[in-house]
Amino acid sequence: MKWINLFFENSRKLWGNDVCNISLLVSIIITFVSIPYISCGQHNFYISTKGNDTWNGAREHPFATFGRAQEAVRSVLHKNGSDYGVTVWVFGGIYYFRKTFKLDSSDSGTENAPIVYRSVSGEKVYLVGGREIPSSAFKPIKDSSTLERITEHNQARKHVVRADLRALRITDYGELKQHGFSIPVVPAPMELFFNARPVQLARYPNVYEITTGEVVDPGSIPRSGDTSHRGGIFKYTDPHESLWAGLKNVWLQGTFHWGYADDMIRIDLMDTVKHEIRLASPDLYGLANDGKPYQHYFAINILWELDNPGEYYLDRDSGFLYFWPPEKLQGAEISVSTLKQPLISLVNASHVIIRGFTIEYGRGLGIYMEGGGHNQIAGCVIRDMGTAGILMGQGSEPVPGRSGLYKDYRGVSVGGKIGDLITHLYNDKAWNRDAGIYQKVESCDIYYTGSGGVFLGGGDKKSLTPGHCAVINCKIHDYNRRNKFLYAGIDVNGVGDTVAHNEIYNSNYQGIYVISGNNNLFEYNDIHDVAMNSDDISPFYIGGDPSDRGNIVRYNYFHHIGKEDRLVMGVYLDDG
């Protein structure tokens, strides 16, 4: 820094002279600041939906794909070295990703010459991991056999339309699977989105939940070591539920024991004489009904319950997608998610900037980051993802035959997916997930995600080496569409990282969850309207390990949190 002080100290001698000297000073400053770019060079490539990959990538002759632009960037770096900065400018439009756009060490820049992928100023660029469904594909239902499967409630038969996905060559719908507290996070099945908002899979009731009735058999209790995998049995109390007897693939989602542990479990059998439901698999803690206000559920994936605008049902056998549009179909943007892998990954890449994109409609992650350092995700919108917006650091692959349902569980490190990450960390606090150093997520909007907003890693707990990674000035909300609990707006596992100036809201679960970490800084965050349907919870949570020391929580605003009949804290230091 001495040269900076000397420069401005000497500049005082110029300041008292005439206008020419002032102009000279300005010219010197401009020249001096520009030196790194003059010495290392700059190159620009362009991508357009009207481009062609056989062109040279100039503004007048842009490429058509990110992959071709990446080849051009690598060619420049190979010829000129990594100190030759390159910017790839992307014109407005929709770019469909059929596979992950992978950046690695071959795509790295340097501190003074980063590699930048960004939108052209003022233009909207959409990176899409799904398929568009034309509004014309939806037709009124005329055959009586199908109409009989749709309720007359709310005159639904007049409003529900359907599209033949197979005719559109969309055949991979994924599967509904059990998911919830301590169950590995996997890519979501195909979901429907209308004007960039997720559509609700047909459910009952449309609002609120049904209280769990008398428990006949709690089922096996994996948390206590019972591996018999026996589903519980309980009595249902709403006569309406008898309508589901004999239907396939009906699922219940709710909290079946503790108010911090959600689950989604398939119905195995309904006994309409005894008014009992037998579940196909166990809940982590077993079923319970001891008068707690959070022991409740709702049912999903039932065509008969498609009785409200903004609901859908997918018949996986026929490929027919049934939908009650909340608004006019004509002119609407209708999409389904298809890509299971992250849309973008940075593995061992350094000094790469991703700026100004809307990343949407994936069944997995928006962005995955591992290793490398000094990368920046800035000014992006990441929404409508099946799992999370950004995963910084590795996840955990389940060990065959075991899962996070059992005590002392540890998985196997894996890239590009969340898996058993949180359960693994609960039993291995010192796990270094190789998130890289000086990684930054800044000024991004992340919302409508299935299992959390951002997983922030960085740093090594064993050596207390800081990662210097950060999530700053982001707006993160509506991040628990699928897994209602356990996955926060920002999940933190690291050393020497920063979470600051973020707004986090609209969730059943926590705003910030420190799974494990030391010497992290949390400041100036506005967290509100979280922990709204859970218990034993808080907007900021850390616990489970007395070695998680040195974390600073200051100048944050926690307000409008939780429900009056639930146990909710402001800052929760749990099980320490």
Image (tube, rainbow, N blue to C red):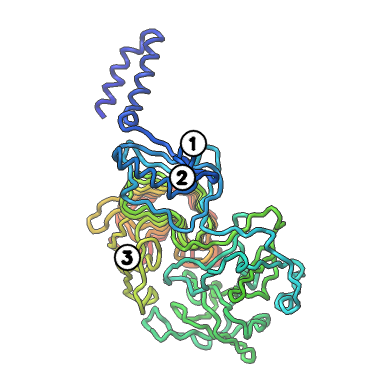
Q: Is residue 10 above or below residue 223?
A: above
Q: Residues within 10 Å of mark 2 (few under 14, many from 20)?
A: few
Q: Give me the residue at 68% from left, 76% from top.
A: 304
* Residue at mark 2: 54
Q: CA distance from mark 1 to mark 2?
A: 14 Å
Of the residues under marks 2 and 3, which one precedes in the sequence?
2
Tell me the kind of residue under disc 1.
Arg
Q: Is residue 217 above or below residue 258?
A: below
What SS does tag 2 mark? loop
Of the residues under marks 3 and 1, which one precedes in the sequence?
1
Q: CA distance from mark 3 to mark 1?
A: 42 Å
Specify the farthest residue to the left.
463
Tell me the kind of residue under disc 2.
Thr
* Residue at mark 3: 413
Tell me the kind of residue under disc 3.
Ser
| Rendering coords of residue 127 (x, y %) | 51, 51
* Residue at mark 1: 59
